[in-house]
Image (tube, rainbow, N blue to C red):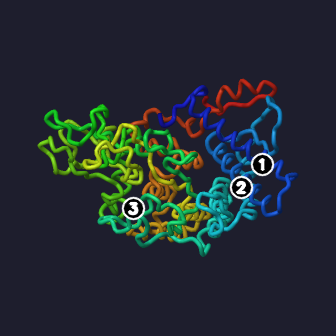
Amino acid sequence: MVGAYGVTSAIPLVHYQSLFKIVSEANIAITYAATATLTDAQRDEIVGQALFFRAFAYRTLAYMYGGVPLITVAVDAPRTDLVRATRDAVLAQCITDLTTAAQKLQPINKVADGRISNLAAYHLLSEVDIAAGKFQDAITAASTVISDPNMALMTTRFGSRSTQAGGDVYWDLFREKNQNRGAGNKEAIWVIQFETDVLGGANVSTSRTNGYMLERQCVPGFGISSGGVALMLFPSDAGTNGLSTGTGGRGIGWGPTTKYFTNTIWASDFSNDIRNSNMNFIRQTVINNPASSQYGKILNTEAPPTGYTSPSRQFFPYQSKATTLQHPAALYLNATTGTLSANAGDTYLDQYMFRLAETYLLRAEAYLGSGDLTKAAADINVVRARAKASAVLPANVNIDYILDERMRELGIEEKRRVTLMRLGLIYDRVKKCNPYYAGEMLQTYNLWPIPSAEIERNKDAVLTQNPGY
């Protein structure tokens, strides 16, 4: 469900515990680096990274749960006397940590791909400053990233498939091996690294590893037939799901799009915004089962076959950034037809955590908060110009417009729940944009509950629950 997680639900619990594990490990590194045998440069690097990750964890906790226990030293014995700090106090600690981290971390041109740089700290600092209502500070932090000579939006084609017909620079951003600065990508700030068939690399070509499964969750199942014959090729062990590169890979459609995402937000620039081209937001695919009387024709989500609706788990528009398109050789049952094993489903690409386009949108949000609509529009229009979309007028900039632009630019890439919880807008946006869940939404769901297991084990103090749970 979008909102209705209870106090015993697994998802709030695993997030709460995982984020506090990051806090705990960061505190150990910070505490013991002070007495470890290290050079000053080594100590700065270790402490800088630990401060960054502590802030990253606490910022997420503050957005999703509100105020939480604030612990900034290593703990070497069980604590059962925790109390919640205020959300403001947690964010203030994040700001302190990130400000220090930004001074200790190396410049982005000096760190290896995947490592945290000073600009990653400034990017996150800008976001946290906005959450704390410190809009001018957020503008300053974002400007540090945007003005850095090592950073730039990619505006010309580049990388591993830059000669692919029909592609564009936005498409190139999400092709294999193109995410990192080592590939010439100057807008990458922090990229999560995945390697295939490498120890510790998270992805294995012979099975699904529960790594980054955007392909499995965000690509439709394509279990579509006409006259009792499947329209798309799939192997005999695939059940009802079409599993081939013609269908974007091994999708099962757990995360179907909404009409708001696929149609409403593109209305003014449906045909000219490259982010909405059929290469980037796939609405049309060629029917590839030779046994079908429809073979070679176009399957179009805007005109579904008789008996099917779009969006539904089996059939909806999807973003090509969810899938590798070119899968590891071991996953193919038939390389000629492109038919994949049911073991497919991971997305075999490095994944952006922070990208410069988002920094522009964060600064636009900060300008909006400070009342400067002209500068807010200017930052949004830098992103829109790269996409060949029409410029937004300052008078039309509000938080809903920025959230829509984040969908257009960062769809399935950003951690959308984190963004909406930061703004306290889960309830409002689901009511507005997602009729499937609108009837279930309560204002309560703007925050997750403190897990009851955490409250119960905290026997020597009261760990208060969020309102409504």
What amino acid type is highlighted by mark number 3? Trp
At x 45% / y 41%, what residue is drawn?
431
Where 413 sits versus 122, above or below? above
Q: Position of residue 53 (x, y in %)?
A: 69, 50
Front residue of 458 and 148: 148
Specify whether 172 is left or right of 57: left
Of label 2 and label 3, which has the lower sequence position? 2
Numbered badge on residue 49: 2
Specify whether 40 is left or right of 65: right
Specify whether 312 is left or right of 143: left
At x 76% / y 42%, what residue is drawn?
70
Q: Position of residue 342 (x, y in %)?
A: 36, 37
Numbered badge on residue 161: none
Instruction: Give yes or no for contact between labels 2 and 1 (Cβ–Cβ under 8 Å).
Output: yes
Numbered badge on residue 29: 1
Front residue of 403 and 410: 410
Q: Is residue 180 visible?
A: yes
Q: CA distance from mark 1 to mark 3?
A: 39 Å
Q: Residue furthest bottom?
A: 149
Numbered badge on residue 171: 3
